[in-house]
Image: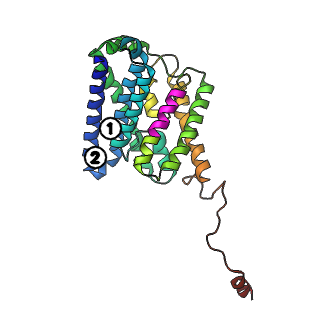
Amino acid sequence: MSGLNVSLGYFLTVVVFGAAFRILFRKCPRLSVAAEFPASFVLVACWLEVQTIKEVGEWAGGLGPDVTLTILFLVLLTHGVICAGATGNPSLTLMNFLLLETHTLSTLLALAAQFLGAHLALLGAGYYWALELNDMHMIKNLMSRECSTALRVSLVQGVFSECVCAFIFYLIYLSLKRRSALIRVPLVAAVLTFFSHSASDYTMAFLNPSLAYGLTFYCPGFTFMEYSVVYWLGPIIGMTLALLLYMGHIPRIFTKNLLYSQKTRFRVPKGEGDKKKK
C-alpha cells in the first residue's frame, strides 16, 4: 500500500504542475497554443506511472488489473477536467485543423508543444524512477532499458487495430463534442479506458501519437519508422475516416458534401412557383 501512496503523490504533483501551467497560459492569451505542452506532459507522465503499476505492480505491490484500470480512468478524467480546451493529442489537433477551427501555424506550434511535453514527461519519469522510492520503481529502473513494447502484433495488424479503435472513438467524440463537459469528459475517459483494456494484447489503443511516442517508441522490438506507421498513421487514418463519415466531407479539403445530400429548409409553395413561371 505504501508503494501506491508514492504513486498517488506522484500523480498529485504532476497534476498540480499541469494546473499551474494552465493558469499561467490563461493569463496570456497569446500563449494559448502553448497550453498543449502541459496537457501532453500531464497525460504522458501519469500514463507512464500507470504503465509501471500495470507491469510490476501486481507482483511487487499486490496491485491487480482492477486497480490499474481504476487509476487510468481517474487519470483520464482528471486530465479532461484540468486541461479543458487543450487536448494533448495530435490527432485531435489535426481534426480541428481539418474542421477549419485552427490555422496552419497554430496547428504546427500545438503539435510541437505536444511532442515536447511528451519527451520531457519521459525524461521526468525516468528521473523519478531512478529515485527508487518503492519496490516498483526499483524494478522499473532496472527494466527501463529493456521495457516491453506495447505493439504485440505485426505492423499490418497494429495499423488496423489503431485505425479501427480510432475510427470508433472519434465518431463517439464528434457526437459528444457539443455536449456539456459534465457528460463529455467522463464518457471520453471511460471509452479510452475501455479501448486501452480491450486492445492490451494488440497495441494498447493509445489513439494519440504523442502519448505513444512517450510510452513505447523507446522500447526495443521495432524501429522508429515502424512505430510511427502504427501509432501515428493508424490513428490519423481512423480520425479522418470518422470525420468523413460523421460530416460527409472534410471542410479543409472538400467544400461539397460527398456522402449526404443537403435538403433545403424552405419549400416554395406550388402556387408561388406557378406564378413565377407565368
On the image, numbered disc 1 is attached to which residue?
Answer: 38
Residue that appears at 53% across and 40% down: 169
Can you identify the residue that label 2 sits on? 25
- x and y percent of residue 21 in the render? 27, 41
| Real-space CA distance between mark 1 and mark 2, rounded to the nearest whole angstrom | 10 Å
The boundaries of the magenta stretch are: 188-198
Is 254 drawn above or below residue 187 in the view shown? below
Q: Is residue 139 left or right of residue 225?
A: left
> Percent x, y for residue 55?
43, 17
Q: Is residue 62 left or right of residue 24?
A: right
Q: Position of residue 86 (x, y in %)?
A: 38, 44
- Identify the residue at image location x=43%, y=12%: 146
Q: Of helix, strand and loop, which one carries label 2?
A: helix
Q: Point out residue 190 in the picture as x, y percentages from the top left corner.
A: 46, 36
Quarter that holds the N terminus: top left
Q: Is residue 116 visible?
A: no
Of pointers 1 and 2, the one earlier in the residue sequence? 2
Relative horizontal placement of residue 174, taking residue 20 as reference (left or right): right
